[in-house]
Image (cartoon, grey):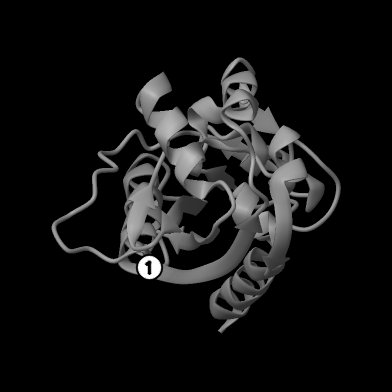
Amino acid sequence: MVQTAEGVGMGRCIVLASSSPRRRELLAKMGLFFRIEPANIDEGVRLEESPYNLVRRLATSKAVVVGTRHPECLIIGADTVVVYQGHIFGKPTSRENAREMLSRLSGQRHQVFTALAVWEPKQGLGRVQVDQVEIEFVSFSEEDVEQYLHTDEPWDKAGAYAIQGYAQRWVKNIAGDVQTVIGLPTRLLTGMLSRSNKGRQQ
C-alpha cells in the first residue's frame, strides 16, 4: 500500500513500519509519500525493562527489521505504551484484559510513552526519540467500560483506549502532546526528518 500526498519528502522512499491506521493518518497529514509495511516483531517486555527503554527498543527494532527489506528507503518505526503505577499496558490480549486496564485507569493519572525511530540503512543513519505525556481520567462506571468494550476502539490500542475517539470524554487533564497518545507526534518527527535531511547533505 502506498500513500501519496503533496509536500515534504517528495522523491524520497519512505516506509512506515506500522499497520496502525492512526499513525498512517497522522503521517499523511504531514504531506509525505510513504509505503506501509509492518515489522511483525515480538513486542514482549523484557525482565525489569522500563517503559522508556521498551518503546525505544521496539521502535528501533521495527525500523531496523523493515530496513532490511528496503535498504534504499528511510524507515519510520514507532511504539506506544500506557503506564499506570509502574505497570505497562500494551494492547489488550482479551476482553477481560481490556476491562481490567480500563477499570484501573478510571479516575487515575497515567503516562503514555511513544518512541519514534528514523533509520536509513544505506547511509547507516539513525535517530530515536521518546516523548511522554501524563493523562488524568475522570471516574467512569463499570457500565461505561462495558459499553466501550462493545465498540471497535479498545482492541488494537495501548491501554485499551483511543483518546481521539469515545475515550476523549474521560480525559480530565492532559499534560503533553495528544499525538503522542495517538502514537505519532508529528512535531517530533518533523525535527527528526529535518536532521536526517541535513545528515544526508553533509
* Amino acid at the residue labelled 1: Tyr
The structure residue drawn at horizontal position 72% and vertical position 63%, both measured from the top left corner, is 173
The structure residue drawn at horizontal position 69% and vertical position 39%, both measured from the top left corner, is 167
Query: As displayed, is residue 9 above or below residue 131?
Result: above
What is the x, y in percent for residue 46? 17, 54
Identify the residue position indicated by label 1 in the image. Answer: 52
Query: As displayed, is residue 21 above or below residue 195?
Result: above
SS label for mark 1: helix
Query: As displayed, is residue 63 above or below residue 56?
Result: above
Residue 199 appears in which quarter of the rendering? bottom right
What is the x, y in percent for residue 130? 48, 69
Decide which of 185, 199 is in the foreground and name it: 185
User: Can residue 51 be seen by looking at this rendering?
Assistant: yes
| Residue at the outermost right position | 6
What is the x, y in percent for residue 77? 47, 52
The structure residue drawn at horizontal position 32% and vertical position 45%, both measured from the top left corner, is 65
Question: Is 56 displayed left or right of 195 in the figure?
Answer: left
Decide which of 166, 31 is in the foreground and name it: 166
| Residue at the outermost left position | 47
Q: How many numbered discs, if any?
A: 1
What is the x, y in percent for residue 129? 49, 71
Quadrant (top left/top right/bottom left/bottom right) for the C terminus: bottom right
Question: Is 99 displayed left or right of 168 in the figure?
Answer: left
User: Can residue 9 be seen by looking at this rendering?
Assistant: no
